[in-house]
Amino acid sequence: MRPPRGRVTSAPWQSVLTLLPYLSPVAPRLMRQARLVGVQRVSPDEAAEIGRVIGLPRTELDALPTLPDGVTLWCTERDRQYVMTQPTDAEVGLLGVARRMD
């Protein structure tokens, strides 16, 4: 999986979001270049690779395979924060219950 080539470039006050459904060969490079990386529940092998690439401490590395639905670990170069999202009733009514497609 690769982001589209040349279709999107960031400019001042503009963000580019790249979603990776799995760790492809280009994922480490994309994660190293990103200013913000969000990680949901991943396999232990993927957690080890992500931890190596972005320098996660052991406690957070061990937590990645056990994260519940709706929880994401957001990482910058200096900070890390777990964030839990919950849909509103209107979102559930319109879109249905959020679920992972593992």
Image: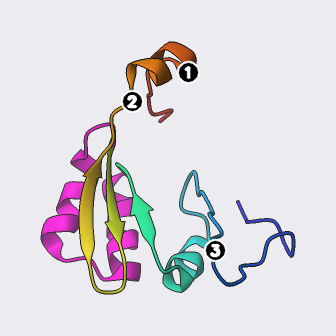
Residue 9 vertical position relative to residue 3 in the rendered view, above or below:
below
Query: Amino acid under label 2?
Result: Pro
Magenta stretch in the rendered image: 43-70
- Residue at 63% of width from left, 78% of height from top? 13
Please give left or right for residue 70 compared with residue 67 in the image.
right
- Residue at 59% of width from left, 77% of height from top? 30
Residue 15 point in image, percent of width and height: 63, 71
- Residue at the spot of label 2: 87
Residue 3 point in image, percent of width and height: 74, 66
> Which quadrant of the view contains residue 69?
top left
Badge 2 vs badge 1, beta-carbon distance below 8 Å = yes
Mark positioned earlier in the residue sequence (3 or 2): 3
Query: Amino acid under label 3?
Result: Val
- Residue at 39% of width from left, 18% of height from top? 89
- Residue at the spot of label 3: 26
Residue 69 is a magenta residue: yes
What's the CA distance linking mark 3 and mark 2? 31 Å
